[in-house]
Image (cartoon, grey):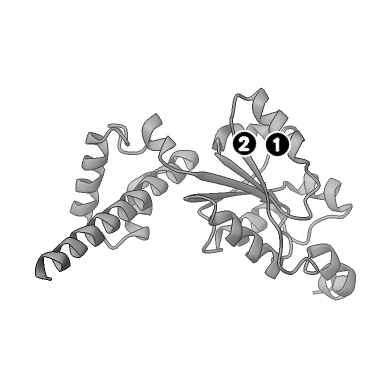
Amino acid sequence: MIFSNELKRESKNRKTLKKIEKVILSAIYVCQIERKRAFDLIKEKTVLSDAEIDSKIDELIKKNLVNNDRNTLTEIGRSSLRIVLAGGVFDIIHPGHIHTLSAAKKLGDVLVVVVATDNTAVKMKKRRPLHTQEQRQELVNSLSTVDLCLIGQEDDIFKTVSHVRPQIIALGYDQVHQEKFITDGCKKIELDAEVARLQSPIPESSSSKIEKEYGESIHGI
């Protein structure tokens, strides 16, 4: 029985180690996209001391998962993560958004969300958004399920897709993009990404419906 308990503890420790490694790799990936120093984000997302963080990064370098610059992932390190990309306007955050983004996060290790620019939002919604693109980015970044939020490109959505290079592109149930359009666009940038159409458990919850019902009150705030 003692031997069995020791094995269970060792197994639990291995799982914890793998989880910590995944957190560190995810943090480095996010900082690589943003061109920021990874150490600070790792410290924010873990309970490790500075020395422990350095030691973990050294281990990941030896495993050929992190480059010697300590701020970027190797191809092996990058491929060890499942990156999920989702997008939208996100002008009025509502329960439908939360459910959709939570479902998207469950598909992989890192969730990157792209908010539409103000000009793109006007084309999509036929109105100016209530919040600027920077404000919407800040709102989405504040959600615990989101690892990174970026402002999109106006002329070509696949520029952002190429920059993030996700394995999965998650589409909301009400998004106009067709799976074939996304798949064909990914082929042009030599990206083999799976397209997942997410369903909302509360499809009646949408920004358009909220604004239609409370539009005058919202715009008058």
Helix, strand, or loop for circle 2? helix
Q: Is residue 74 among the parts visible in the rendering?
A: no
Residue 63 quadrant: top left
* Amino acid tagged 2: Val
Check the image and report above or below for 34 versus 145: above
Q: Position of residue 211 (x, y in %)?
A: 85, 68
Q: Work out how far the residue at label 1 is from the one at label 2, CA to CA, in angstroms.
A: 7 Å
Residue 137 in the figure: left or right of residue 131: left
Left or right for 72, reference 111:
left
- The residue pinned by badge 1 equals 157
Please tell me which residue is depicted at 54% across the width and 52% down the height of the picture: 107
User: At x 28% / y 63%, what residue is drawn?
Assistant: 47
The furthest residue to the front: 1
Residue at 75% x, 35% y: name it.
180
Badge number at residue 161: 2
Indicate the position of residue 113 as horizontal and vertical percent values: 61, 50
Does residue 151 appear in the picture of this structure?
A: yes
Q: Is residue 10 left or right of residue 112?
A: left
Rendered-image quadrant of the N terminus: bottom left
User: Where 194 sits versus 122, above or below?
Assistant: above
Q: Quadrant of the C terminus?
A: bottom right
Q: Position of residue 201 (x, y in %)?
A: 71, 67
Q: Position of residue 6 (x, y in %)?
A: 14, 64
Q: Residues within 10 Å of mark 2 (few under 14, many from 20)?
A: many
Compared to 4, does 73 lie above or below? above
Q: Is residue 144 left or right of residue 123?
A: left
- Give, as a three-letter code, the residue at label 1: Ile
**Number of numbered discs on residues:** 2
Cβ–Cβ below 8 Å for labels 1 and 2?
yes
Q: Is residue 181 above or below residue 94?
A: above
Name which residue lies at 34% across and 53% down: 42
